[in-house]
Image: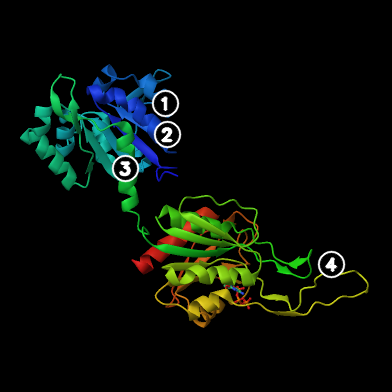
Amino acid sequence: MSILRGKKVLLGVTAGIAAYKSATLVRAFIKAGASVQVVMTEKAKDFVTPLTLSTLSKNPVHSSFTKEEDDNAVWTNHVELGLWADLMVIAPATANTLSKMSNGTCDNLLLATYLSAKCPVYFAPAMDLDMYIHPSSKESFEKLTSYGNIMIEATSGELASGLVGQGRMAEPEDIVRFIETQMQEKLPLRGKRVVITAGPTYEAIDPVRFIGNHSSGTMGAELAYRAAELGASVDLILGPSALKVEHDLITVHSVVSGDDMYEAVHQVYEQCDIAIASAAVADYKPSHVADEKIKKNDDTFTIHLVKTKDILASMGEKKQGQFLVGFALETQNEQENALKKLKKKNLDAIVLNSLRDKGAGFKTKTNKITFIDKDGSPTSYDLKSKKEVAVDIFDQILIKTT
Ligand code: CTP
């Protein structure tokens, strides 16, 4: 799965012959799962039509500060466009545009958008070989790089002039690959291992019955996706769940009982950097599992239960530098009880769900949490989707671990 999946790419197209390749570039970004908007200079339209690029990007192409709508001039908001983007890619970037970018000139929509963009900006120069090595071009490259923009070097080959040398815009597939590699290298959890427990456990009574709970595993799955998005390799220890978790960086270990979960966790815990226990592990299990289906012979029936192993507590005991996060579901004296749990289980942080909050806990798509660190300092969040909650939890973990 490409790291560009779900990302918003703003493609700036300027007036070089390589602009014809921007159509392929749009397609390559879309194929990687990104959404694309195109901003182009007026002159670039001589090389590739806005219709081609709007059809491929499935979005209108922007090129002027105003457009006509119902006989009214409507302003194209370059600030909004710049803020929309997760990354801006100027390809092809001509010597003229690069010089203007490096000097803060703002005489077209593309340049205004560039100056407004807060996201990473990549530029792929395309020009003739002598232009490419001219001191003024070199100065533009250096200035832009010093601003934090990222240059995708031109390649060597036959140029539009017929001359052979460096100046050809990098091929669209190579541009996409370059950006993917660059983005991956910058991920804050790259090279880290994360273990997450999730879902319910089923404790067998007999071959057909069990003690379980309503946990869907969604919160844990979202945490796993977020960790992977941040570049970590993830071991997701997942109790019985209908969820399909698929990601190149996530290994799913499907388990059934608390004992299975305990075993699976300790196969991977020692090597991990961060562990989060979001599973709703049954606290008790039948002391004896019947070999055959139990018949309803009597009017009453009692199952003798014994405590399950506390997986999180065992992780706390064996901790050797891992950042360990637990969950607490409380109904009264929430923060006080959560903090007690944090201390008792030797955690670094605990995520508190209060059952008093509507929309929090099991079987919902949302959650409302308070993140409490070792010192007992709480950060409370609004009711959000579990996906957004996972982002908040990892934002906190990153603050504490980096
Ligand atoms: N947990 C665990 N193994 C268990 C029980 C709980 O790993 N056998 C983990 C959960 O995944 C969660 C945390 O411990 O991260 C808190 O679980 P919770 O059931 O709320 O707390 P308990 O410690 O079991 O205490 P109590 O039920 O008495 O509130």
**Separation of residues labelled 1 and 3 (CA atoms):** 20 Å
Residue 30's label in the rendered image is 2
Across and down, in percent, residue 311 comes to: 57, 74
For the image, the number of numbered tags is 4
**Separation of residues labelled 4 and 1 (CA atoms):** 60 Å
**Residue 213, quarter of the rendered image:** bottom right
- Quick one: SS at disc 1? helix
Instruction: Classify the position of ligand 1 by quadrant: top left, top right, bottom left or bottom right.
Output: bottom right
Numbered disc in front, either 3 or 4? 4
**Separation of residues labelled 3 and 4 (CA atoms):** 58 Å
Tell me if mark 1 has few (under 14), some (14-19) or many (20+) residues whose alpha carbon lies within 10 angstroms of its own: some
**Separation of residues labelled 4 and 2 (CA atoms):** 54 Å
**Separation of residues labelled 3 and 2 (CA atoms):** 14 Å
Kindly indicate whether the residue at mark 3 contacts the one at mark 1 (C-beta within 8 angstroms).
no
Q: Please, what is the three-letter code of the amino acid marked with disc 2?
A: Ile
Kindly indicate whether the residue at mark 2 contacts the one at mark 3 (C-beta within 8 angstroms).
no
- Of residue 243 and residue 383, the one placed in the foreground of this image is 243
Numbered disc in front, either 1 or 3? 3
Residue 293's label in the rendered image is 4
Kindly indicate whether the residue at mark 2 contacts the one at mark 1 (C-beta within 8 angstroms).
yes
**Residue 16, quarter of the rendered image:** top left
Task: First in sequence, mark 4 or 1: give its number.
Answer: 1
Across and down, in percent, residue 294 comes to: 86, 69
Across and down, in percent, residue 338 comes to: 54, 76
Q: Please, what is the three-letter code of the amino acid marked with disc 4?
A: Lys
- Residue under pointer 3: 179
- Residue under pointer 1: 56
Q: Is residue 173 visible?
A: yes
Kindly indicate whether the residue at mark 2 contacts the one at mark 4 (C-beta within 8 angstroms).
no
Q: Is 217 placed above or below 138 here?
A: below
